[in-house]
């Protein structure tokens, strides 16, 4: 579901059948070599919709372009709302260029694997573990993809929209025993 063009430049590019790129030169330079990456403005933040097979290469290019900080990695479950059920979302920040970039990666329910960003941004480690724990997204190439919040023997992934809710007390790691 694409958003409406928000500038005359985008409208002209769309009318000409051309790919629209952001006005910011760093973002435009980052996106231009990746023909399959779609740029969308979202409010006041730039968003790149990245195919999962290009995620690590795109993240590496972003790091080289000055996005030195990975701010967050999480997921969204669009159960019965979109054709592709999940979306992994990562936030990047360039202090050098004073710009943020949100990466959105569509992930099919039948193949819920995504390349890990840990080789590019080591800070992705715990974010990816939490996303695995809560949503069941598998990050290929992650050095230690194990549960981080829930007990190792916990069945299921509680932030999936089809996870049954109930009144069962949850015992988190390193917390006092629930009785």
Image (cartoon, rainbow, N blue to C red):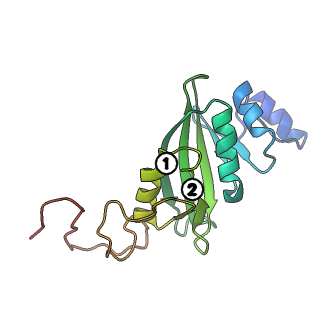
Snapshot quadrant of residue 129: bottom left
**What residue lies at 59% left-to-right and 22% top-to-bottom?**
96
Is residue 57 toward the left or the right of residue 117 in the image?
right
Q: Determine which residue is flagged by label 1.
A: 124
Of the numbered discs in the image, which one, if any, rests on residue 116? Answer: 2
Badge 1 marks a residue whose secondary structure is helix
**What residue lies at 40% left-to-right and 57% top-to-bottom?**
130
Quadrant of the frame with the C terminus: bottom left
| C-alpha separation, residue under disc 1 versus residue under disc 2 | 8 Å
> In this rendering, does residue 45 appear at all?
yes
Considering depth in this image, is 69 or 77 the residue closer to the camera? 69
Give residue 2's position: percent from left, percent from top: 69, 49
Give the mark nearest the N terminus, 1 or 2: 2
Q: How packed is label 1: few (under 14 Cα within 10 Å), some, or many (20 or more)?
A: many
Is residue 105 toward the left or the right of residue 124 in the image?
right
Give residue 88's position: percent from left, percent from top: 55, 55
Snapshot quadrant of residue 52: bottom right
Is residue 97 toward the left or the right of residue 76 in the image?
right
């Amino acid at each position: 579901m694409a958003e409406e063009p928000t500038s005359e430049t985008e409208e002209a590019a769309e009318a000409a059948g051309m790919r629209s790129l952001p006005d910011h030169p760093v973002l435009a330079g980052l996106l231009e070599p990746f023909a399959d990456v779609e740029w969308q403005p979202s409010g006041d933040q730039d968003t790149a919709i990245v195919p999962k097979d290009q995620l690590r290469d795109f993240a590496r290019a972003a790091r080289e372009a000055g996005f030195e900080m990975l701010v967050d990695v999480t997921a969204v479950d669009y159960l019965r709302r979109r054709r592709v059920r999940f979306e992994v979302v990562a936030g990047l920040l360039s202090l050098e260029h004073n710009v943020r970039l949100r990466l959105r990666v569509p992930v099919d329910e039948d193949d819920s694997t995504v390349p890990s960003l840990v080789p590019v941004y080591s800070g992705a480690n715990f974010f990816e573990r939490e996303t695995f724990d809560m949503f069941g997204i598998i990050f290929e190439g992650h050095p230690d993809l194990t549960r981080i919040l829930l007990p190792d023997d916990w069945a299921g992934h509680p932030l999936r929209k089809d996870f049954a809710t109930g009144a069962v007390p949850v015992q988190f790691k390193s917390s006092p025993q629930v009785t």
